[in-house]
Amino acid sequence: MGRGSFVGRRIADRLTYANVVSTLCLFVLLGGGAYAAVKLGKDSVGSKQVRNGSIKGADVDESSLKAVPEATEAANARLLDGVDSSELVRSFAGNVPSASVGPVFYVNELDALLLGDTDPGAGSCFRIRHTGDFGDIFVSDLVDETAPRFVVPALHTSPNSCADGPLVLTNTVHPNLMLVFGCAQAARTYCYGQLIDAPAIDPQSLRRASKR
């Protein structure tokens, strides 16, 4: 008996059903992968061929995605009946007990906090707290904005003011805005205000007028 027959018989003796099946499966898998690599063309894989969770954000071209229906409404969230919200007048109002020195309302755009006065029997009085780090707040009569009643430096609080409204509050850091406001007092101190676009006023002229 030749050496080849001996080797062949030894291999045959070692073959089992499990060996044969696993070897066949290996060839099928390798052959299938090679087939897929050769036969699948560009853009030929659709959603049915993709396993859930296998696609990551980096794999997606965002420009190819369409907006979801809700996103169209979100893009128009600034509009009210077709009008841009930046064109609307912002209103403020609040009240505190007449004996309270606490906050009435805050105007973030002007760094201005309107407070109750420190004298409960003083009538419709108020104070202004400048919460910003820069600029000056000017409080003037609406009919004469060039002659401020008082000035509040940054991070300061004004004394009590019992000026009759309507009054105008401006901030040199935000010259394009103004708050028209006033206060009244009964059992409580009531204050109201509207934030609007300010006419062109030279801050230097306000400073000069405040020093007269």
Image (spheres, rainbow, N blue to C red):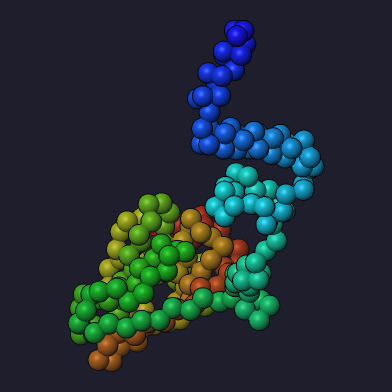
Q: Position of residue 20 (x, y in %)?
A: 57, 34
Residue 26 sits in quarter: top right
* Looking at the image, residue 124 lies above or below residue 10: below
Q: Residue at x 36, y 81 (%)?
A: 94
Which residue occupies the extreme bottom position in the image? 186
Residue 148 showing in the rendered view: no
Q: Residue at x 68, y 48 (%)?
A: 61
Q: Position of residue 143 (x, y in %)?
A: 52, 78
Q: Quadrant of the C terminus?
A: bottom left
* Left or right of 88 in this view: 116: left
* Looking at the image, residue 203 lies above or below residue 199: above
Q: Quadrant of the N terminus?
A: top right
Q: Residue at x 51, y 59 (%)?
A: 174
Q: Position of residue 189 (x, y in %)?
A: 30, 84
Residue 94 showing in the rendered view: yes
Along the line of sight, the residue nearer the viewer: 96 or 163: 96
Along the line of sight, the residue nearer the viewer: 181 or 44: 44
Q: Position of residue 121 (x, y in %)?
A: 20, 85
Residue 30 sits in quarter: top right
Along the line of sight, the residue nearer the viewer: 156 or 95: 95
Count all numbered tags in the image, as a single digit: 0
Q: Residue at x 56, y 19 (%)?
A: 9
* Left or right of 20 in this view: 191: left
* Left or right of 57 in this view: 188: left
